[in-house]
DNA sequence: CTGAAAGCGCTTACAG
DNA sequence: CTGAAAGCGCTTACAG
């Protein structure tokens, strides 16, 4: 590959359909129909001339115009935080599925890999972001739950601009839109069985902030409670504070409690990291003195010391599914009340942070 | 936050400007001007009535239309692989800067956190992706180098559709577009000084694939060569194969070589991981027997055992800078040949993978 | 200070 | 089988 040369800026504007039609010697309307494949009744000769003319001039459809005319932009707004590898995986799945269908996602990011945005603090900004998407006439929206809830709360103010929505990781009893969630019940049952099988009878769970938009957190905790009860494991639950920033403190407190749990399960791998740190401070070895189970299988989990046993959420599949559901909804909008609610399997990945309970 | 209710679908279409004008009792043109802030010569009374009418109806500008009319969509195409935390950071910076300017990035992803795309294999697909962006009339493009090169190589076929481009991590001697790169010379000099100070005199460097689009890889290797020469450290360079997948083999070979280097520097933190593995296999301890320096400071670097000494690239700043340059170029297009070439500082982060050279 | 009219680049009934 | 015309929802000279 040789160094390319800066292109000599060609003076003209992009070619218009008019130019193509003239070059091919047909009317504007004919050219339009032929180029959209609606060539039903044109002679092959004509079709070919038009196609050739378009190729010669380098003409390409102006999607802004067709968007305006047809009301469809083949574009989907996505509001999701690029917070960790789970969400990046979801985003990748969305891009993959939408790309196949020749749709383009338009993503609005908040925060980054270091900072999970705390949406509750700033619902107004959320609406601004969604409006920027709606102003571009996206055909649908894939939303992170805090935005999803804001969207529906402001549905009135949105007036006639509402579009189909798919939410990720939010399960609503009120069925307000299509949703994809992880099968929390099955996943937590696997965790409970795994720990029980290793002889653990006294387990602690560090839950996340359990705010309304985090329905997964509530489901995950309840799932684990039910599963532990059914296999006969005692479970002590702690919840993080409103800010969700005290996992370290919670872990330290747990490790000082008497009797000390022989295993700790955390809402996500993030908190498992804090447990590792607290255990090191307390001079406890993992998994010798303490077993740890995370959730999500984030990218750093296999590299932890020891590698973390965790539940792998299928991020890509979740993204693909959400995009697919939204696409279906865009095609056939609104059969009210028949929203889909898909559960995606998660898989327990046993690594070295779990071992038989100390005697 | 109570469970929201599904909105009763309002029957109408979104309000048009016409509706606003009628409600306010002014002409279409007047309403248009007032709502775009071009209210130069309208009575305050009139302005207020129009604004009120728009608010009442929930009218919002249709950006497809203004895009078509003005030729500006306030949208930027971004083609970048979400491959690791460096690129995610770049993406976050782009979103931040573009958002401030009320522009929206439209990103086309290839690959995901697990798979770095190998673009060279599929330039045709690359052009397709860029065309999908151009068809939506993006005002500019921020490109990953392999795409940037393809873009300029196909500039002819793009005809009059070219838009301003900013490239990340590509430095061209031919100055074909604005570019942001890391200050490789300064960064590698810091690495050389650090190792020299610890007494290392025989160092190995594992370079990346040095294909044309990876100009950073070439610069990084040359920078380190020059820096080592100037401080008096012997440097042995190995390059990865075309596929870039043999870092483990290269590391193992290096550790068997005689005399064995006392330190290994790698093109990125990814290869440093392979070195850790190879060292473990060979029964060598880091940093006791071998010091290791990575590059990028990816998210997993601080969590490695031992935590990796590496050069932190300022991903967010790189993204912000690229977006800013592109925005400037969109405002005042094309003062040919005066492309900017910004170097962003990188910072050596000393952790526990480097120590004095064994005697 | 404000309105009527042409136009952005297409699509889509409707005629022939 | 193909063309002339109206229209999508606005913006923007150009008149008054």
Image: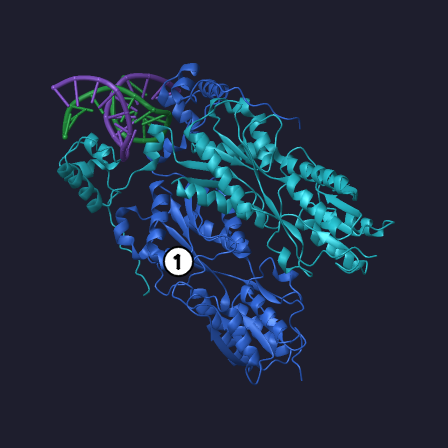
Chain colours: A cyan, B blue, C purple, D green
Q: Position of residue C16 (x, y in %)?
A: 12, 19
Q: Position of residue A148 (x, y in %)?
A: 57, 32
Residue D2, compared with residue A203, is above or below; it is: above
Residue at 43%, 65% in the rendered image: B243
- Which residue lies under the disc numbered 1? B119
Q: Residues within 10 Å of mark 1 (few under 14, many from 20)?
A: some
Q: Left or right: where does residue A206 sit relative to residue A131?
A: right
Image quarter for residue A44? Answer: top left
> In front here: B145 or B122?
B122
Q: Position of residue A277 (x, y in %)?
A: 74, 57
Q: Residue furthest right?
A: A258
Q: Position of residue B255 (x, y in %)?
A: 57, 78
Q: Work out whether residue A248 can be spotted.
A: no
Q: Secondary structure at mark 1?
A: helix
Q: Quadrant of the C terminus of chain A?
A: bottom right
* Number of marks in picture: 1
Image quarter for residue A353? Answer: bottom right
Residue A241, compared with residue A160, is above or below; it is: below
Residue at 53%, 56% in the rendered image: B84
Residue B282, compared with residue A191, is above or below; it is: below
Q: Quadrant of the N terminus of chain A?
A: bottom left
Q: Work out whether residue A267 can be spotted.
A: yes
> In front here: B18 or B33?
B18
Q: Left or right: where does residue B332 sit relative to residue A253?
A: left
């Amino acid at each position: 590959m040789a160094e390319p040369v800066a292109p000599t800026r060609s003076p003209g504007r992009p070619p218009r359909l008019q130019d193509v039609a003239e070059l091919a010697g047909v009317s504007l309307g004919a050219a339009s129909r032929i180029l959209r494949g609606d060539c039903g009744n044109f002679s092959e000769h004509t079709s070919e001339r038009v196609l050739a003319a378009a190729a010669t001039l380098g003409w390409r459809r102006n999607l802004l115009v067709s968007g305006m005319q047809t009301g469809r932009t083949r574009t989907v707004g996505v509001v999701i935080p690029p917070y960790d590898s789970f969400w990046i995986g979801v985003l990748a799945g969305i891009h993959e599925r939408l790309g196949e269908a020749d749709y383009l996602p338009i993503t609005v990011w908040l925060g980054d890999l270091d900072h999970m945005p705390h949406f509750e603090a700033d619902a107004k900004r959320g609406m601004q972001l969604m409006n920027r998407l709606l102003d571009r006439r996206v055909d649908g929206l894939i939303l992170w739950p805090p935005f999803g809830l804001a969207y529906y709360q402001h549905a009135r103010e949105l007036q006639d601009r509402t579009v189909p929505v798919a939410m990720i990781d939010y399960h609503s009893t009120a069925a307000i839109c299509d949703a994809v969630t992880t099968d929390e019940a099955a996943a937590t049952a696997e965790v409970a069985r795994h720990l029980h099988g290793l002889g653990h009878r006294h387990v602690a769970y560090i839950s996340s902030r359990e705010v309304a938009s985090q329905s997964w957190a509530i489901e995950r905790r309840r799932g684990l409670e039910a599963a532990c009860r059914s296999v006969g494991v005692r479970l002590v639950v702690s919840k993080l504070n409103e800010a969700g920033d005290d996992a370290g403190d919670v872990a330290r407190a747990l490790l000082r409690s008497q009797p000390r749990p022989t295993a700790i399960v955390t809402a996500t791998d993030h908190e498992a990291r804090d447990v590792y740190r607290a255990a090191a401070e307390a001079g406890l070895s993992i998994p010798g003195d303490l077993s740890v189970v995370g959730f999500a299988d984030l990218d750093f989990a296999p590299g932890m010391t020891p590698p973390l046993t965790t539940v792998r959420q299928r991020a890509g599949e979740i993204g693909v599914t959400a995009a697919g559901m939204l696409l279906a909804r865009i095609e056939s909008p609104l059969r009210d009340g028949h929203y889909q609610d898909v559960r995606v399997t998660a898989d327990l990945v046993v690594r070295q942070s779990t071992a038989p309970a100390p005697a």
